Amino acid sequence: MSEQTPQPSPELFFQTVNAYQRTAAIKAALELDVFTAIGEGARTARELAARCETAERGMRILCDYLVVMGFLTKEGGSYGLTQDSAVFLDRRSQAYMGGVTEFMLSPVLTGGFEDLAAVVRRGTTAMPEGGTVAPENPIWVKFARAMVPMMAMAAQAIAQLVGERGGAKLKVLDIAAGHGMFGIAIARQNPNVEVTALDWPNVLEVAKENARGAGVADRYHTIEGSAFDVDYGTAYDVVLLTNFLHHFDPPTCESLLRKVHGALAEGGRAVTLEFVPNEDRVSPPIPAAFSMMMLGSTPSGDAYTFPELERMFQSAGFSHSEIRQLPATPEQVIISFK
């Protein structure tokens, strides 16, 4: 028998037009602490409504919708957590990520997509004053406070890649440090690591809090200001560029990378964390889709393929670059050698 040609369906269109309801549902579930309540033993709509102080009808409809989305399971009238929800959305979990909505659903970010047609016509963000890369934009304080759980696994993986477990002395510069967890993870692994974090002053306050909490404050130093303007110093063994290059166009990135190259000791490495799409620019889904975030929120940022990043580093003077996949994250690490 010949294969039947799939019939046209408006299903994807309806799912996409109604996608705002998915965002609203997960935001409401986190605000009401539904996942934590289920983890603590409230399973029926009535029990959850009592625990979360909602109407039973509202809770039933919300939880059924979360089942449809894949965040909950349902057997009879009893709801349960999926493995992912138990790890990332139950507030009692050390890997709880619910707080990231403070950044990812910030009006500053979502506002850049209110008139996406106009953004596409312009080819650049409609946000005022440079979008998210405007000097000392307060959104980066929200980022620093909210994104630690999401970055924890990547920070540990990078620490294992470059942290010199044997205890060798290591001088690390963390550019656009944000919450500081990447440099902190390396410092925690190796007692002979000295970290210098660079960011805006208000953001660095968060990084310093995290360094104190991790017990590495005596080896954690800071440089306040713009990565494009301040003096880095020299002789760094590692320079971290985590989730930073995608905010800028290639010429701007190359200018920064030449400065990074000059700050590294001979044999030093630049360690870059990025969403790296394949050369077709439509796969894998999460890295490929990240270009849309940059279109809506920056003047000229993008998600760059590995060959594009490799060319930037070569133009800045680096000898060669290697790409590494990190476990349990859609991002990849590029290690570039001086």
Image (tube, rainbow, N blue to C red):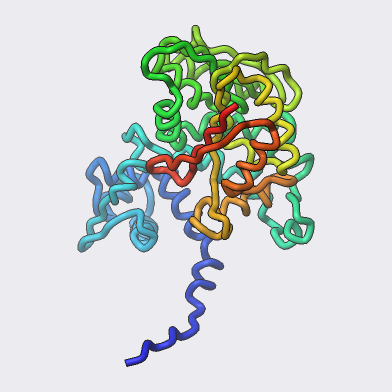
Q: Quadrant of the C terminus?
A: top right
Image position, residue 12 (x, y; %): 50, 72
Q: Nearer the viewer, residue 181 or 79?
A: 181
Q: Residue at x 41, y 11 (%)?
A: 191
Q: Quadrant of the N terminus?
A: bottom left
Question: With 258 as the anchor, is 76 left or right in this view?
Answer: left
Q: Residue at x 44, y 51 (%)?
A: 26
> To which quarter of the image does residue 141 belong?
top right
The residue positioned farthest toward the top in the image shown: 218
Q: Residue at x 57, y 46 (%)?
A: 306
Image position, residue 9 (x, y; %): 48, 81
The residue positioned farthest toward the left in the image shown: 76
172 shown above or below 274? above
22 shown above or below 201? below
The residue positioned farthest toward the bottom in the image shown: 1
102 shown above or below 180? below
